[in-house]
Image (cartoon, helix red, strand yellow):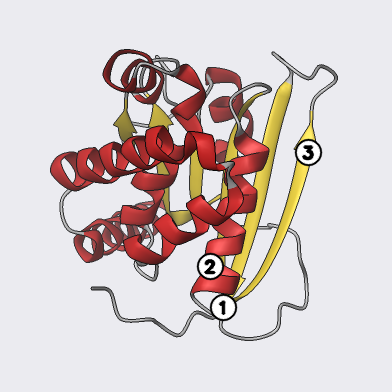
Amino acid sequence: MKKLQQIERFEVRLSGTGGQGLITLGRMLGYALAIGHGYHVTQTQSYGPEARGGSSRADVVVSSKPISYPKTENLDLLVALSQQACNTYYHYMKRSGILLVDTTLVQQPPTNVFLGLPFTELATKKIGNPLTLNTLVLGAVTHLLPFAEPRTMRTALVENLPAKIHEVNLKAFNLGLKQARQQFGETPGLWQAAEAQAEAEADFSD
């Protein structure tokens, strides 16, 4: 079980296209971190010109203290579920940030340093329901956030979705969490590696 941590400020952007459930994903993540974990959270969202196929993103800012500025400025975690979103928002990341992509749809990440899972393929082939894409991602994101407790995230999922789809979405969440654990390794090591990479890049550019 992860111990709740003190967080100065942590910024997450969930990005992709309309129809991927990103706004619901952002709402569930924000709810879980605020109501379930007790953090201060702001959640903002942006839609493209079309409900489906247009750009879509949801931003979540988390802190142990009241948040003075609610919008994201320097992303700690960028989740990109489309190539366009990846290309557009990669430049908003901190040097020490982590990029998580859907390898089904993001064929050319703008960097060699990223984490990836085939979320769209997993939702379609393993779960059998493409609409579970967002809860698959929530499972993987839960593993990546050092301050997120899986049990609390599952409770938030249940409290934010209709009862008739609880079972399939819990299955998707658990698969996303399991895949992230297997493919990415221990959470602290991921962030330590990201910090080391950022320091190396800073030294190289000096």
Q: Is residue 100 visible?
A: no
Which residue is the site of mark 3?
A: 46
Circle 1: residue type: Tyr
- Above-or-below relation of 90 to 203: above
Which residue is the site of mark 1?
A: 39
Element marked by disc 3: strand
Mark 3–mark 1 CB contact (< 8 Å):
no
Q: Is residue 198 visible?
A: yes
Circle 3: residue type: Ser
Q: Position of residue 38 (x, y in %)?
A: 55, 80
Q: Quadrant of residue 71?
A: bottom right
Q: Is residue 200 left or right of residue 130?
A: left
Which residue is the site of mark 2?
A: 33
Circle 2: residue type: Leu
- Above-or-below relation of 184 to 187: above
Q: CA–CA distance between discs 3 and 2?
A: 20 Å
Q: CA–CA distance between discs 3 and 1?
A: 23 Å
Q: Quadrant of residue 109?
A: top left
- Above-or-below relation of 160 to 172: below
Mark 2–mark 1 CB contact (< 8 Å):
yes
Q: Nearer the viewer, mark 3 or mark 2?
A: 2
Q: CA–CA distance between discs 2 and 1?
A: 6 Å
Which residue: 53% across, 19% down?
Answer: 83
- Give the quadrant of the C terminus: bottom left
